[in-house]
Image (cartoon, rainbow, N blue to C red):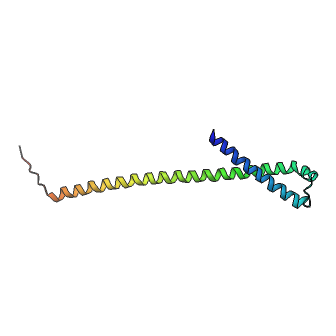
Amino acid sequence: MKKNNESFKESAKVYFWTFILVLILNQVLFFGACLNAVCLVAALPHVSIISFFLGRYIIRSEIENKNIGSKLDTTKAKKNEKQSLVDEEKKRLLESLELDEDLKSLKVSFHTYDL
């Protein structure tokens, strides 16, 4: 529930600041910097629509960036885990090879008996 609340707050911030930015740009570029109430009310419908789609794009790109980052972290963790398993196996194999060399160096002779 907390995560959803934080997500909503972040989305609301993005939409709010996107709306303000689009409104200011709209008034400066298309309405000759008219900040009268009549001009602002006339701009609300199309500024709201533009802000909605622009905010949606911004939020989706942020989510994709977070997903890519978490996938990279997961991949790195798996790679590190696999590397540690490989290192452990190498160590075990080297130890067994050293034991084999020790046995060969003992030069134990086997006697065979004919029955």
Tally the numbered discs. Answer: 0
In this picture, residue 85 sits left or right of residue 77: left
In this picture, residue 21 sits left or right of residue 102: right
Residue, far right: 38
Quadrant in the picture for the C terminus: top left
Q: Name the residue: 65% across, 41% down.
A: 4
Query: Horizontal and vertical percent for residue 106?
Result: 15, 57
Q: Name the residue: 70% across, 50% down.
A: 59
Quadrant in the picture for the N terminus: top right
Query: Horizontal and vertical percent for residue 22?
Result: 82, 55
In terms of depth relative to the viewer, which is nearer, 39 or 47? 39
Q: Name the residue: 65% across, 50% down.
A: 63
In terms of depth relative to the viewer, which is nearer, 49 or 83? 49
Q: Name the residue: 76% across, 49% down.
A: 15
Residue, far top: 1
Query: Horizontal and vertical percent for residue 110?
Result: 11, 52
- Say if 2 sits above or below 64 in the image: above
In this picture, residue 2 sits left or right of residue 77: right
Query: Horizontal and vertical percent for residue 53?
Result: 78, 50
Query: Where, by quadrant of the figure, is residue 94 drawn?
Result: bottom left
